[in-house]
Amino acid sequence: MELETMRPTPTWDGAGYEDSLDVWRALADDIVVKVWGGDWCKDCRSQLPDFGAALAEAEVDDVEHYPVEKADDGSKVGPGVEEYGIEYIPTIVVEDADSGEELARFVEEEDRPIAVWLAEELEQYV
């Protein structure tokens, strides 16, 4: 199942994000991007469409969606939640496509857009 919130924002403009997009483009064929989120989640609805647009612009094709629901006790449930220790969404894990090694992880929010924050973390692998 795909996350509706990962559908790229149609009005997103990559101008001003070229440095970040260059990192994503350089790694596009060597990474897997795993996205945990919920279409019900306001943070996901506000952040993931622009992230989806950045990935599309950089031609990152190996993107896996992991829809998450909230349990009655507030915990998150869904595929891979326990295995990856998902507590907050959105959570994005970027892995090396060959080894499965985790290269970077974004959890819930930062002071920069997801694509920018992760690009800064991933720059060392370019």
Image (cartoon, rainbow, N blue to C red):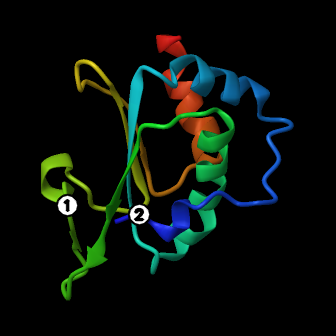
Which residue is at a point 50% across and 26% down the rendered structure image? 121
Counting from the top left corner in percent of width and height, residue 80 is at 19, 54
The furthest residue to the right: 15
Q: Which mark is residue 2?
A: 2
* Residue under numbered circle 1: 79
In the image, 16 versus 98, the foreground residue is: 98
First in sequence: mark 2 vs mark 1: 2
Horizontally, residue 53 falls left or right of residue 16, namely left
Instruction: Report helix, strand or loop for mark 1.
Output: loop
In the image, 14 versus 103, the foreground residue is: 14
Which residue is at a point 68% across and 21% down the rendered structure image? 22
Which residue is at a point 51% across and 69% down the rendered structure image? 4
Does 25 appear above or below 76? above
Q: Amino acid at mark 2?
A: Glu
In the image, 10 versus 36, the foreground residue is: 10
Q: Nearer the viewer, mark 2 or mark 1?
A: 2
How many neighbours does mark 1 have within 10 angstroms: few (below 14), some (14-19), or many (20 or more)?
some
Instruction: Report helix, strand or loop for mark 2.
Output: loop
Q: Amino acid at mark 1?
A: Pro
